[in-house]
Image: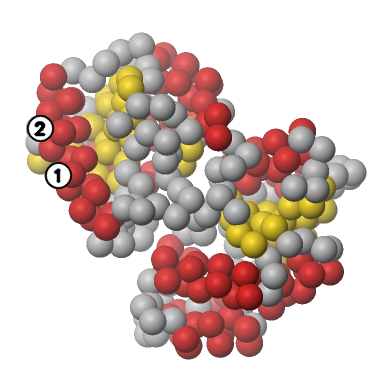
Amino acid sequence: MDRLGVIAGNGRFPLLLVREACRRGGTVVVAAIREEAEPEWERAYRDHPQVQVHWLGLGQLGKLIELFHEHGVTQAVMAGQVKHNKIFAGSGSVARRLLHARPDWQMMRLLMSLPRRNTASLIGGVMGVLEQEGIQLLDSTSLLSDSLPAAGVLTRRRPSSAEQADIDYGRPLARQLAGMDLGQTLVVKDQAVVAIEAMEGTDETIRRAARLVHHQPLTVVKVSRPGQDMRFDVPVLGTDSLRVFEECRVSALAIDAGRTLLLEKDELLAGADRLGIAIVAE
């Protein structure tokens, strides 16, 4: 992997992935999505000898392909999320709703060919176009495999009997919802569903749940999709998540072993221990 392309969305995932690629001696060409990527790219990699950062709009698929061809990129990863409400804001067809992102002709052609008008179909379509152009999409966790937890209790504290009952109740429901191409996060209290993730994303789902139960303790279940394509939309948790957990009194968290990225894992688990949060992977 001498030369790697990175399509960078929001969060720390793409930043950590690039850092690991550099540690292994590779050259990295970053296509940072202007509407999503962290401003830190400008500071962290402005003069880095191994990293070239280029800013692209959300709808500039043709420019992305040109960029990777120009720099000899034949392998790439998608890292970091693009918020669903950035893609599906407004009303009307997918093509109409994406006009705020100023899609180029190649993106518009893709949109018109989609069999289903949802995020998974759109990202799958982008991957198909890239591979037709000779750009292979790799498993987005391939450089951070140590961040994928094994099964078991990951924190000092195990879930209480009540929390485990909530996990056992919520996990099969969360997997059914993920299989229906809905959100990947479910919030449970006393074996009742408080909130289901939709377009707002995990953090806002948890905040909505906290408001509904007047900030009583909550159990969160976060799962991957059945047959999860590890090239995109892999569940991710990082140290930033701890602020939301503390704010919303999350007391227990269940995740999928081997299919959830724990960014800065040691710091994340130490923070969970400090807050008394039980995290279990299955």
The vertical placement of 4 against 270, above or below, is below
**Residue at the top extreme, as displayed:** 156
Q: Is residue 182 left or right of residue 54?
A: left
Q: Could you say where residue 251 lies in the image, as x and y percent from the top left? A: 27, 25
* Residue 199 position (above or below residue 109): above
Q: Amino acid at mark 1?
A: Val
Residue drawn at the location 68% of the way across and 66% of the way down: 135
SS assignment at label 2 = loop
Look at the image and tell me in which quarter the C terminus lies: top left
Instruction: Give the residue number, with chain letter if any, for mark 2.
Output: 190
Task: Report the front residue among 175 and 93.
Answer: 175
Q: Is residue 28 above or below residue 246?
A: below
Q: Residue at x 35, y 60 (%)?
A: 199
Q: CA distance from mark 1 to mark 2?
A: 8 Å
| Label 1: which secondary element | strand
> Farthest left residue?
191
Mark sitting on residue 121: none
